[in-house]
Image: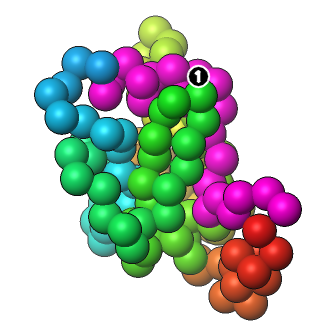
Amino acid sequence: MGRFAVITMTDKAADRVREIVATRDNAHGIRLGIKKGGCAGMEYTIDLVTEPNPKDDHIERGGAHVYVAPEAALFLFGTEMDFEQTTLRTGFTFKNPNQSSACGCGESVELKPADLKALAEARASA
């Protein structure tokens, strides 16, 4: 059986997480969550983790550690976290099947919760 993961991350995202952690004292990884805000209603949040919360879902790829806040799991289930660096933007990006729309500036999104039954089945089968 595989290990359950609320989200997946690309190699680029894992590389960037490792870079962030390497430059911060006592950092273990980053924590991904959501909060109400922006013109579309919700925003992704990313915080540095110095003390992992045992209630968070933990995702690890090549030594990069991402923790997902429990209250965000239903909104992030199935999301792929990536990192992009372009002329106009540098930052994490999210391909989220639960996203129903986004604002024009790209800073906020509208998210619908994933099917609770699908999340429970995925956790049980891992």
Quadrant including the N terminus: bottom right
Residue 114's quadrant in the figure? bottom right
Q: Nearer the viewer, residue 45 or 7?
A: 7
Q: Nearer the viewer, residue 83 or 103?
A: 83
Can I make out residue 87 in this image?
Answer: yes
Query: Is 73 displayed left or right of 49 in the figure?
Result: right
Can I make out residue 39 in this image?
Answer: no
Q: Nearer the viewer, residue 97 or 87?
A: 97
The residue at the point 50 percent across, 56 percent down is 58
Query: Is 94 displayed left or right of 103 in the figure?
Result: right
Q: Position of residue 30 (x, y in %)?
A: 35, 43
Instruction: Tell me the magenta residue range.
Output: 1-21
Q: Position of residue 13 (x, y in %)?
A: 54, 29
| Vertical order, 115 against 103 (above or below) | below
Q: Position of residue 35 (x, y in %)?
A: 31, 67
> Residue reaching furthest front?
1
The residue at the point 30 percent across, 20 percent down is 22
Q: Position of residue 20 (x, y in %)?
A: 32, 25
Q: Please name the residue that numbered disc 1 is placed on.
A: 12
Query: Is 62 displayed left or right of 34 in the figure?
Result: right
The residue at the point 50 percent across, 13 percent down is 86
Does the magenta-highlighted stretch encompass residue 23?
no
Identity, as a three-letter code, of the amino acid under mark 1 = Lys
| Vertical order, 88 against 82 (above or below) | above
Quadrant including the C terminus: bottom right
The residue at the point 50 percent across, 64 percent down is 57
Residue 29's quadrant in the figure? top left
| Disc 1 packing (10 Å; few <14; some 14–19; many ≥20) | some
Does the magenta-highlighted stretch encompass residue 14?
yes
Residue 44's quadrant in the figure? bottom left
